[in-house]
Amino acid sequence: MYRCAKCQRVTTARSSAHSVVSDIRPREYTHRANAIPVAGGKRRKRAKRDDRGGRGWEIRSEILVCTDCLPEAQSELNAKIEALTASA
Ligand SMILES: [Zn+2]
């Protein structure tokens, strides 16, 4: 049993909970030289690759919702992603 974060109702026992991302933030990862060790080369010094960096998302918060509120919560997340990609 749990309380749904959207409708605030306490669910019945053994009903499934859905964890939905409720807030995200954009994140930029910088290029890092020699950051990733490459397997192999026991005798010689182990080779390293560069992390090429890039951009992505970080989860800011997650909520537990009931099955009834799941579509609504997912569409809210999609709207948030669209708003962030439009402004970037
Ligand atoms: Zn609910």
Image (cartoon, rainbow, N blue to C red):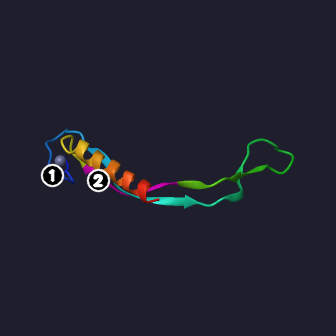
State yes or no: residue 59 in magenta: yes
Task: Name which quarter of the figure residue 74 lies in.
Answer: top left
Query: What is the x, y in percent for residue 62?
Result: 33, 54
| Residue at image mark 1 | 7
Q: Which residue is drawn at 62% across and 55% down?
A: 53
- Does the closest atom of ligand 1 sit within 8 Å of the Cβ of label 1? yes
How far, Cα to Cα, is label 2 from label 1? 12 Å
State yes or no: residue 84 in magenta: no
Q: Which residue is drawn at 79% across and 49% down?
A: 47
Q: Disc 2, disc 1: CB below 8 Å?
A: no
Does dot 2 land on a helix, a strand or a loop? Answer: strand
Query: What is the x, y in percent for residue 9?
Result: 13, 51
Q: In the rendered structure, which amino acid carries the disc numbered 1?
A: Cys
Q: Which of marks 2 and 1 is nearer the N terminus?
A: 1
> Left or right of 55: which side holds 38?
right
Q: Residue 21 carries which label?
A: none
Q: Give the magenta part as a residue range.
A: 56-64
Does dot 1 land on a helix, a strand or a loop? Answer: loop
Q: In the rendered structure, which amino acid carries the disc numbered 2?
A: Ile
Q: How crowded is mark 2: few (under 14 residues within 10 Å), some or many (20 or more)?
A: some
Q: Main secondary structure of the magenta part?
A: strand
Q: Can residue 21 be seen in this view?
A: no
Q: Which residue is drawn at 78% across and 41% down?
A: 40
Q: Residues within 10 Å of mark 1 (few under 14, many from 20)?
A: few
| Residue at image mark 2 | 63
Q: Residue at x 32, y 51 (%)?
A: 79
Between 78 and 30, the residue placed more toward the observer is 78
> Left or right of 42: which side holds 88?
left
Task: Name which quarter of the figure residue 30 lies in.
Answer: bottom right
Residue at the limit of the structure toward the right, as seen here:
44
Between 31 and 44, the residue placed more toward the observer is 31
